[in-house]
Image (cartoon, rainbow, N blue to C red):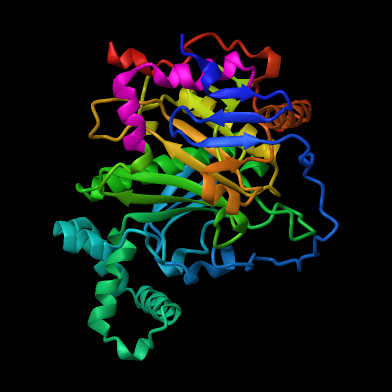
């Protein structure tokens, strides 16, 4: 068994010294710092919002569809059935009400120029056809040029100085780019009165959240299919401005990249030395220190150690390593765990949700897991000079707060059925990914 005490040490004064087994990040939690309870009550400084027939609070809202690039896919609900509609033209955008939309990001992190100039990327014929059809539609053409002009202005460029041919070329990013957003329909919860009553992941029903995750994975597959040079797709969700969100409107981001990224590279190096490291340094370690928060047949959640921000890790137990290979039951169970944690955190805490999974070109395999980080503290001078980070909330405090909230939510029947706290089985090596390596 691993010597877990080298990663998590309680000093005589109560200081908790933590080292993350995967990153080596050193974190201290010093006793005596104030720790507020997690609540979804309306804050005293909340402002009343103006009621709108169609929300228009930001560019992701229903009344502002033409302020985002051409839509790639929307998920609608008819009765109990969810149906995808693809590449809607401007004239049809208001004919249905989406549950989620998949749209290009106006400002890509990895641009179309990157793929073209570094890889000689050629846009697939079917996508060129879609682009030409959209531009042949009068309202479609107006929409594309409106978005291009808006982007140029935001970049500080006078649209009048850019010719039409160049603008049409710029529109390639809208149809074949590898940076997409999965945008929720609502800005505020139904019948919201105050500006803090935002529609977040935790405000969904468990079924809606499952559709959100499923729709996101479908977007990943679309990007992979349309660009053979993509080696990994970074999936993340920034909730609220302190977590880096441009709009306080729920959305996930998918960013195609031509490498795995530093985090995945580092974890793969550790994995080659110890194929069972995710069990040992994930749920087994959490079990050893009583940090497990919740569990079901398909996933486990625990308060993690050695992070700059209070962090909850959620691991899929499935032996399937790619998000898009999980069965419906496995995906629903994993989604239920993510949803439960978001519901416990409420819509008022800024969070980052980060996805980690096995790259398609890797022969070493990791389980699909997600980190949810609470952006409640700001690293300062001490951290910069020492590379020791002060996390104001201990993993135990985080565990207790989330468990308390989960029990309340379960009583209210707002989350799916899960085991909470001491109810969890937490047997050794619950993650089945290693079966693929035998």
Q: Compared with residue 132, is residue 371 higher up or lower down, i.e. above or below?
A: above
Q: Is residue 39 left or right of residue 332?
A: right
Please provide percent x and percent y for residue 364: 27, 25
**Image: magenta residue range:** 264-291
| Quadrant of residue 132 within the rendered picture | bottom left
Residue 91: within the magenta?
no
Q: Is residue 325 left or right of residue 150?
A: left
- The answer to whether any part of residue 95 appears in the image is yes
Which image quarter holds the C terminus? top left
Residue drawn 37% across the image and 56% down it: 179
| Quadrant of residue 62 within the rendered picture | bottom right
Please provide percent x and percent y for residue 380: 60, 53
> Which of 11 and 62 lies nearest the eye of the viewer?
11
Residue drawn 57% across the image and 54% down it: 185
Q: Compared with residue 434, is residue 248 higher up or lower down, i.e. above or below?
A: below
Residue drawn 47% across the image and 21% down it: 281
Residue drawn 64% across the image and 65% down it: 54
């Amino acid at each position: 068994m691993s010597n877990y005490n080298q990663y998590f040490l309680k000093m005589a004064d109560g200081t908790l010294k933590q080292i993350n087994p995967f990153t080596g990040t050193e974190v201290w939690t010093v006793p005596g710092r104030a720790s507020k309870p997690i609540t979804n009550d309306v804050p005293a400084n909340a402002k009343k919002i103006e009621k709108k027939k169609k929300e228009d609070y930001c560019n992701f809202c229903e009344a502002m569809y033409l302020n985002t690039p051409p839509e790639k896919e929307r998920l609608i609900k008819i009765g109990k059935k969810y149906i995808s509609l693809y590449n809607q033209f401007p004239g049809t955008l208001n004919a249905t009400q989406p549950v989620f939309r998949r749209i290009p990001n106006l400002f890509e992190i990895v641009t179309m120029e990157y793929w073209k100039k570094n890889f000689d990327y050629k846009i697939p014929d079917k996508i060129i056809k879609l682009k030409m059809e959209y531009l042949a539609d009068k309202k479609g053409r107006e929409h594309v040029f409106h978005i291009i002009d808006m982007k140029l202005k935001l970049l500080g460029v006078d649209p009048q100085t850019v010719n039409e041919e160049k603008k049409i070329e710029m529109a390639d990013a809208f149809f074949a780019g590898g940076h997409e957003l999965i945008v929720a329909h609502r800005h505020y919860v139904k019948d919201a009165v105050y500006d803090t009553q935002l529609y977040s992941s935790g405000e969904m029903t468990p079924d809606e959240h499952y559709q959100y995750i499923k729709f996101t994975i479908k977007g990943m597959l679309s990007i992979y299919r349309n660009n053979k040079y993509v080696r990994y797709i970074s999936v993340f969700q920034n909730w609220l401005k302190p977590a880096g969100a441009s709009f306080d409107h729920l959305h996930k981001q998918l960013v195609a990249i031509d490498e795995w990224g530093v985090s995945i590279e580092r974890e793969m190096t550790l994995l080659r030395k110890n194929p069972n490291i995710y069990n040992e340094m994930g749920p087994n370690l959490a079990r050893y220190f009583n940090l497990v928060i919740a569990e079901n047949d398909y996933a486990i959640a625990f308060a993690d150690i050695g992070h700059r921000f209070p962090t909850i890790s959620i691991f899929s137990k499935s032996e399937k390593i790619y998000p898009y290979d999980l069965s419906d039951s496995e995906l629903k169970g994993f989604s239920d765990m993510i949803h439960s944690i978001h519901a416990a955190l409420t819509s008022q805490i800024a969070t980052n949700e980060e996805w980690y999974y096995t790259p398609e070109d890797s022969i070493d395999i990791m389980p699909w897991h997600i980190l949810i980080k609470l952006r409640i503290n700001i690293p300062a001078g001490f951290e910069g000079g020492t590379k020791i980070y002060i996390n104001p909330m201990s993993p135990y405090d985080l565990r207790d707060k989330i468990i308390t909230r989960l029990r309340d939510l379960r009583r209210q029947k707002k989350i799916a059925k899960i085991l909470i706290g001491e109810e969890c089985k937490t047997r050794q090596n619950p993650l089945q990914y290693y079966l693929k390596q035998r």
